[in-house]
Image: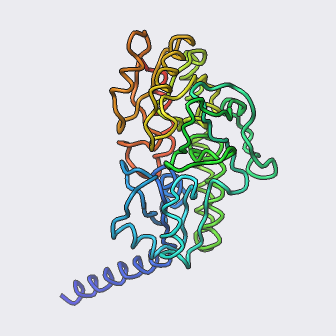
Amino acid sequence: MTKIIRAAGLAAVGWAMTGLAWADVPSVATDITPVHGLVARVMQGVGQPDLVVPPGASPHSHSMRPSEAKALNRADVVFWIGPELTPWLEGPISTLASKAVVVPLLTTEGTQTLVIRDAVQFTLSGDAHHDDDHHDDHGHDEGGHDDHADHHDEDHETHDDHGHAHEAGSLDPHAWLMAENGLAWLDVIADVLAEKDPENAGLYRDNAKAGQAEIIAAAAQIKSDLESVRDKPFVVFHDAYQYFETGFGLPAAGAISLSDASDPSPARIAEIRDVVTDQHVTCVLSEPQFNPGLVATVLDGTDAGTAVVDPLGVGLEPGPGFYTVLLASIANAIADCK
């Protein structure tokens, strides 16, 4: 009996020590599932980040639940895209996570950024902006970062992806859809966590390197999978895929809606129908949370197919493997669109 009690006591001590070890790991909060996935990959085997904007919720207008507010309140580190995507989150971060290290990934050094497009029809010109002095040493090109445009919509829609007015030159916040940014952000995340938690610094950096290898392999497969549709233009429901298009060299022809926070005008719908016909568009990408009737209107009388896709990966399992699965899901939707 004594031995049993002693064993139980040792087990309790072991659990207590485990609890202490976990307690020493930084508490980390993230905004959206793609960022959560990258952070989870870096923290794999050490801890798990919290997610403030749950799957299926709009990043532009989500009302935080008490559990999500608590995640911010206890956070030692917050990784988020930035106010360009979730302007409503800026206030809660400054008040609830006032003592945390806050990292807006969109403006971190080495991130490649693109300007919001306002036009119905996209034109291929310009380059992604990036810092050549940092995070460009991966030696991998997911498809040539040279295909974006900055135009103004003729029907004068003046809402960006947050439903707010924006000025010419505003950054497109959907930067996670460029694999090069995923590669760069893994380094950023590992560096921040290593500084906050030196004891696990080696594991964070090893995880980041392993995650980068996974992204590189996924990007190579995606390039191969998209080869058969590279010359077939497609239309998106709202302009959220510019980074994916640019990174993989795809010919997106235009967007039905300027943003997911505003309905397209009749003039814009008429113009996008002309784009579908004139450019022989073969696919229209819909999104699960939007009115399928608009897509049907655009498709009416054409031979174009349709597929459902989501830039945040609604329906995909959050976690360390999320990011590469998200990129692959978008590629599969485009490649299989009928």
The vertical placement of 147 against 1, above or below, is: above
Q: Foreground residue, 206 or 83?
A: 83
Q: Judge from the rendering whether residue 78 lies leftward or rightward of residue 59; answer left or right.
A: right
Q: Is 185 rendered above or below residue 3?
A: above
Residue 159 in the image, given as x and y percentages of width and height: 53, 44
**Image-based side of 149 in relation to 5, left or right:** right
Residue 11 in the image: x percent, y percent?
31, 80
Where residue 147 sits, quadrant-wise, is top right
What's the coloring here? rainbow
Question: Looking at the image, which is closer to me, 42 or 98?
Answer: 98
Query: Would residue 332 be found to the left or right of residue 152 on screen?
Result: left
Residue 194 relative to residue 316: left or right: right
Residue 98, percent from left and from top: 54, 77
Name the residue: 71% across, 34% down. Answer: 145
Furthest-right residue in this view = 133
Instruction: Tell me the quadrant of the picture where the C terminus can be found.
Output: top left
* Residue 192 visible to the viewer: yes
Q: Residue furthest bottom?
A: 2
Q: For the N terminus, which image quadrant? A: bottom left
Q: Residue at x 63, y 51 (%)?
A: 209
